């Protein structure tokens, strides 16, 4: 019993939250919503008016016609009124539906825009902490769930007017017959409420069962190869069948509930009509009402049955909307990225030096960089070396301000990173990641990417990245579309295009974060040599291959969040921890990076 | 994962014969799901009865007006009460008929859908890997989830409303004809334009929904791109570009949705409007000519209610059209999966392989994926029992495919593979699984504990217990790692093993192979980089795992090739060189090229 009470309260609060959400939506797009409401009120009025006209047509045209005849003017007038009022009603429905759709689609667009703006402004760490699928689901499924409820809202709100108009017209025509309506209408309301409550948990359970079926399908089919090698097809099928059986059971449970309630929504008004006819016949025999009144009331009841169900539709959609909206709220309240200066400073021209002063950085509890200080002179080329998890990639991100350090300062060309105008920083400092992302556009555009680089500059950058040769033999050369729906490139080719992308910006600080790992080692060495010799830039390379490391002017050995040693590769080889690590690269991870041949 | 998020836009190019056209799909679908057919006639009969029941009300009105209160005679209240009571009983009965019909329909269609879902799922697992390319997997998942769910909606709503809707329309017209065939014709003529208008709306709706789907797909692509490339977007300050593209896509989607809305908003009201036109025509003609046709006033009033009854199913059927098309398309796709031939026929009972180390022979093996170019072009090779061999070659040279054929994940398109002198296609499936174990590249794990995942490794008789699983880790020298885990052997690995690092997942995959104690081990070396520490543990485990077994390693590292007894070099689906490492090097051919590129890494140091 107490559990029941708690459940009710919970539901009420979901309902309350749902109403608040709907109100907030309406505030954002009041105009289409209002027009839709006007359509709904007009619809309600026209619906009740049409029954009144039907009644009068019966009394003043049909019945007289079969007795004594009727004059042509009355006849045409009646017919015209009938057609007109329904035309108005049809127009009102169009108005209501169209603008209800507009409200909900506009709201969808607003929420979706807000989601992507959040994605744009949130720190990279946020993106890292969530799978891409989840981020997509927020922008698509959650937005849809959060806004679907808006579609039937204007209708269901204006059903209140319909009921109001209906009750008034009932009472005005015949208070005694009105009593039938006054019994039926609340009964329908109760039935709606009861239905909503009973079907909701069943619907939730079914939804969950679908989720589980789909999770197993995903996992099992993705792992089909392993399933086969282990000979586990049968047990996978029975695992799937178990879930499918639960889903069947839940769906059938819901279907039975629906089977019990759905027909009732027709049966109840029909029984009302029968009662009305029985009572009406008696009122008619006493001369208290006319046949027209009866016709009017019967058709009113017929027209009421469907709209009354709308309230139920909205109630059914509310929990989904609340869940969807609250999931989005989770994104909206995430703390934003770092602040940017309004009027930022510009960097000195030419290659810029880097200097770190007591920089510390943590991911949550995990301290990655600890009191880190070092200097890289302008035009110097430095290799950053260290075991996995030493914080090399984090450092690369801090250097181009993809995140701010928790403590300490980073200076670029002597200026605090936080003081540099963001646009200027992006032009001057470029990082190339190991995982090279290709946009679904042409090779040319992938390299230029809004940098304003000319065609020649693009080709020049590609040449320096040793990418020009293979780009030229692509089906459409530089215009070949790559990315998810385009030509598939090998990892090494993608990395070279990503490098060209950085070079096209003529950076004054270039950071390569394991950016040539999939490129053939001899090609890698050639690229790095050229970059060092020809490019007027400060170069910081994070690499695993000895060949790449040895090319640098200086090697920084990073371990435990600090620089443990610094010097030429040859010199450092006498430092035992460094030597051990480099040897490990050679034997293990380093060698594994050679995808035989490419 | 990303792929499955996308709307499946690429249709299967090969639609099975017999699945073209909606009727064929329907016929085939019913044939495949006997659960749907059993008792279907009874269910339909119930639905029809409950539909025809809605005609009772207009009849009641007519009876009350004409015979109860009609004409000049005294009102017969007794008669009115009697017919009202009768109709009330009929209405009650209709409720139960409707309820029963609906419940039966749900029960049988859900049962049918479950069977279909599971059958398709089982069929997918029975397909040869020739049909299991990466792209196809996402499609298969959609088939057993979203596509079957569309069907469920169709079977329980739209499908049945086609039947009830047409019964109601036909029934209403029939009753109209009884009252006055002249007026019925009038109604027919006045609502005729509706058919045309609904058809027009329909065509426009279909094309606008198509556009909406395309736009939704485009928005998703744009969002997915901005999310997947978040680091590049930030590092290169591409905010404006992304903003411009995303907002453009969102706006285009909105406009497509509103275009569809324009037509959608008109479907119902147009039914309403033509209902009113018909009503007006009925009143006009009925009043002018009714008396001379012998019509009564009650019948004319009843006629008006019949017209009212007509408009709802007409509009509903127009809206149904779209859903039906979607459902049929979904059904077709689901059924088409069943038509993909099973790749492998297992021999029964099949030959049992001898114990101990086994040799491998390939004779003229060719292979191509369905609809693809040849991947293997005539491979002939011998692996002695107990030998450790490596297969090397560039990405796409066919070495991984060859490994799959060795464990019979698919059969060669031509040629044969012999294991211990027995044709692989004649080996009993159980014996094959015990003797040959393949460890795929990604070490895919199932959601569950490490222990359960390793225990999966031993199928059939003699299920592995805790001690066996622990022994497997110990034998591979991985017990330290296991101890280091928070929950040890009962640590959960997450979906697809994603809670573990790539290296850790591989360790579990190796233990899973170890526990099976196979005679032949096929290793597809992982390419994913792991830290040196893990790398060392893994290579040690691999060494122990392959001890005393015929081992074929698909090598991505030349150090593995260097250590092998014999090396096969694949190039574009052909075996181009073979020999031991040293001999191959002195040959100065393909292998030398591969080796030199590897040397590029160490020469500076050495």
Image: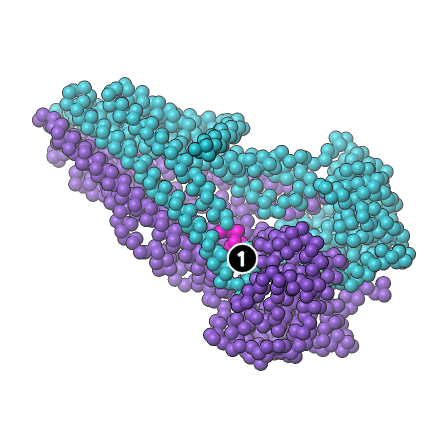
The secondary structure type at the circle numbered 1 is helix
Rendering colour (chain B) = purple
Residue in view at x 63 percent, y 58 percent: A488
Q: Nearer the viewer, residue A176 or A458?
A: A176
Magenta span: chief secondary structure: helix
Residue in view at x 79 percent, y 66 percent: B599
Q: Which of B474 and B319 is in front in this view?
A: B474
Taking the image as shown, residue A578 lies to the left or right of residue A198, namely: right
Taking the image as shown, residue B364 lies to the left or right of residue A393, namely: left
Q: What span is colored magenta in the figure?
A: A213-218
On whether residue B133 falls in the magenta region, the answer is: no
Taking the image as shown, residue A135 lies to the left or right of residue A124, namely: left
Residue in view at x 79 percent, y 60 percent: A584
Q: Which residue lies furthest to the bottom in this view?
A: B421
Q: How many marks?
A: 1
- Image quarter for residue A66? top left
Q: In which quarter of the image is the N terminus of chain A?
A: top left
How packed mark 1 is, by other alpha carbons closer than 10 Å (few <14, some 14-19, many 20 or more), is many
Against A128, residue A73 (above or below) is above
Against B445, residue B54 (above or below) is above
Q: Which of A310 and A422 is in front in this view?
A: A310
Can residue A367 be seen at all in this image of the molecule? yes
Image spot of residue B375 (x, y percent): 60, 69
Image spot of residue A553 (x, y percent): 88, 53
Rendering colour (chain A) = cyan
């Amino acid at each position: 019993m107490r559990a029941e009470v708690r459940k009710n309260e919970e539901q009420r609060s979901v309902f309350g939250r749902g109403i608040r959400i709907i109100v907030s939506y309406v505030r954002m797009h009041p105009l289409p919503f209002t027009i839709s409401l006007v359509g709904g009120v007009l619809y309600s009025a026209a619906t009740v008016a049409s029954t009144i006209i039907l009644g009068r047509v019966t009394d003043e045209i049909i019945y007289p016609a079969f007795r004594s005849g009727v004059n042509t003017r009355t006849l045409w007038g009646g017919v015209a009124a009938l057609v007109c009022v329904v035309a108005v009603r049809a127009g009102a429905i169009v108005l209501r539906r169209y603008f209800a759709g507009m409200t909900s689609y506009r709201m969808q667009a607003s929420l979706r825009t807000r989601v992507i703006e959040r994605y744009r402004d949130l720190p990279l760490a946020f993106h890292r902490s969530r799978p891409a699928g989840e981020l997509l689901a927020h922008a698509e499924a959650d937005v849809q769930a959060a806004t679907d409820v808006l579609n039937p809202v204007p209708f269901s709100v204006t059903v209140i007017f319909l009921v109001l108009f209906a009750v008034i017209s009932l009472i005005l025509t015949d208070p005694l017959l009105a009593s039938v309506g006054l019994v039926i209408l609340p009964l329908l309301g109760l039935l709606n409420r009861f239905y909503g409550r009973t079907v909701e948990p069943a619907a939730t359970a079914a939804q969950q069962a679908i989720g589980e079926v789909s999770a197993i399908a995903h996992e099992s089919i993705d792992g089909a190869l392993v399933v086969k090698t282990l000979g586990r097809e049968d047990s996978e099928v029975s695992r799937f069948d178990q879930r499918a059986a639960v889903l069947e059971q839940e769906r059938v449970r819901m279907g039975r509930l629906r089977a019990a309630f759905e027909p009732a929504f027709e049966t109840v008004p029909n029984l009302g009509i029968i009662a009305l006819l029985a009572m009406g016949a008696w009122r008619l025999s006493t001369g208290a009402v006319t046949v027209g009144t009866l016709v009017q009331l019967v058709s009113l009841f017929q027209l009421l049955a469907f709209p009354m169900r709308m309230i139920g539709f909205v109630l059914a959609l509310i929990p989904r909307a609340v869940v969807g909206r609250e999931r989005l709220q989770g994104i909206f309240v995430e703390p934003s990225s770092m602040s940017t200066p309004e009027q930022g400073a510009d960097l000195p021209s030419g290659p810029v030096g880097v200097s770190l002063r007591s920089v510390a950085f943590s991911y949550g509890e995990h301290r990655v960089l600890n009191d880190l200080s070092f200097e890289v002179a302008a035009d110097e080329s430095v290799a950053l070396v260290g075991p996995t998890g030493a914080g090399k990639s984090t450092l690369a991100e801090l250097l181009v301000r993809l995140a701010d350090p928790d403590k300490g300062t980073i200076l670029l060309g002597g200026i605090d990173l936080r003081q540099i105008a963001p646009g200027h920083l992006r032009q001057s400092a470029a990082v190339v990641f190991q995982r090279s992302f290709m946009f679904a556009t042409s090779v040319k555009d992938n390299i230029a990417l809004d940098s304003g680089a000319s065609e020649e500059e693009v080709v020049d950058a590609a040449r320096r990245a040793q990418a020009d040769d293979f780009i030229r033999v692509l089906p459409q050369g530089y215009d070949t579309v790559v990315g998810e729906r385009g030509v598939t490139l090998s990892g090494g080719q993608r990395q070279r295009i990503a490098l060209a992308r950085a070079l096209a910006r003529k950076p004054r600080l270039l950071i390569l974060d394991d950016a040539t790992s999939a490129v053939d080692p001899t090609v890698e060495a050639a690229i790095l040599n050229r970059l060092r010799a020809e490019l007027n830039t400060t170069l910081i390379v994070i690499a695993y291959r000895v060949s790449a490391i040895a090319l640098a002017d200086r090697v920084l050995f990073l371990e435990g969040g600090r620089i443990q040693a610094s010097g030429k590769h040859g010199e450092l080889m006498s430092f035992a921890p460094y030597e051990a690590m480099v040897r490990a690269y050679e034997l293990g991870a380093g060698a594994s990076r050679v995808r035989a041949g490419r | 994962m990303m792929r499955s998020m996308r709307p499946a836009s690429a249709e299967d190019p090969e639609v099975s014969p017999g699945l073209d056209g909606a009727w064929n799909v329907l016929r085939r679908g019913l044939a495949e799901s006997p659960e749907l057919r059993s008792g279907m006639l009874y269910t339909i009969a119930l639905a029809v009865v409950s539909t025809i029941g809605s005609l009772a009300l207009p009849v009641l009105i007519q009876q009350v007006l004409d015979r109860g209160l009609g004409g000049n005679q005294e009102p017969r209240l007794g008669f009115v009460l009697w017919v009202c009571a009768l109709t009330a009983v009929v209405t009650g009965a209709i409720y139960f008929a409707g309820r029963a019909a609906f419940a039966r329909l749900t029960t049988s269609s859900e049962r049918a859908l479950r069977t279909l879902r599971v059958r398709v799922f089982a069929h997918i697992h029975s397909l040869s890997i020739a049909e299991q390319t990466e792209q196809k997997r996402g499609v298969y998942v959609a088939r057993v989830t979203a596509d079957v769910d569309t069907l469920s909606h169709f079977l329980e709503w739209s499908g049945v409303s086609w039947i009830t809707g047409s019964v109601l329309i036909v029934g209403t017209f029939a009753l109209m004809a009884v009252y006055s065939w002249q007026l019925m014709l009038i109604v027919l003529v006045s609502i005729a334009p509706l058919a045309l208008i609904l058809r027009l709306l329909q065509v426009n709706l279909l094309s606008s929904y198509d556009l909406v789907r395309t736009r939704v797909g485009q928005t998703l692509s744009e969002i997915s791109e901005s999310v997947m490339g978040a680091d590049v977007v930030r590092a290169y300050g591409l905010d404006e570009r992304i903003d411009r593209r995303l907002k453009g896509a969102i706006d285009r989607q909105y406009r497509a949705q509103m275009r569809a809305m324009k037509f959608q908003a008109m479907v119902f009201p147009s039914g309403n409007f033509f209902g009113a036109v018909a009503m007006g025509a009925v009143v006009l003609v009925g009043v002018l000519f009714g008396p001379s046709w012998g019509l009564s006033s009650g019948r004319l009033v009843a006629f008006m209610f019949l017209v009212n009854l007509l408009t709802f199913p007409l509009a509903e059927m127009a809206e149904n059209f779209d859903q039906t098309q979607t459902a049929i398309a979904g059904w077709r796709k689901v059924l088409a999966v069943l038509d993909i031939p099973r790749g492998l026929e297992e021999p029964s009972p099949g030959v049992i392989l001898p114990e101990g180390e086994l040799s491998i022979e390939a004779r003229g093996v060719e292979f191509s994926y369905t609809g693809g170019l040849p991947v293997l072009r005539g491979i002939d090779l011998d692996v002695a029992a107990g030998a450790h061999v490596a297969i090397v070659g560039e990405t796409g040279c066919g070495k991984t495919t060859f490994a799959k054929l060795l464990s019979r994940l698919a059969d060669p398109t031509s040629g044969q593979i012999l294991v211990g002198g027995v044709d692989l296609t004649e080996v009993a499936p159980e014996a094959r699984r015990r003797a040959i174990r393949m460890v795929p590249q990604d070490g895919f794990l199932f959601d569950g504990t490490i222990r359960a995942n390793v225990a999966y490794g031993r199928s059939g008789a003699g299920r592995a217990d805790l001690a066996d699983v622990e022994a497997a880790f110990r034998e591979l020298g991985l017990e330290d790692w296991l101890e280091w885990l928070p929950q040890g052997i009962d640590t959960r690995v997450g979906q697809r093993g994603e809670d573990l690092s790539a290296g850790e997942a591989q360790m579990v995959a190796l233990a899973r192979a170890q526990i099976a104690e196979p005679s032949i081990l096929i290793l597809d070396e992982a390419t994913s980089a792991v830290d040196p520490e893990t790398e060392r543990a893994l290579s040690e485990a691999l060494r122990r795992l392959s001890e005393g077994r015929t081992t074929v390693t698909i090598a991505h590292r030349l150090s593995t090739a260097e250590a092998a007894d014999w090396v096969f070099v694949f190039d574009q689906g052909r075996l181009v060189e073979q020999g031991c490492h040293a001999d191959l090097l002195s040959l100065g051919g393909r292998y030398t090229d591969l080796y030199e590129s590897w040397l590029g890494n160490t020469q500076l140091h050495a």
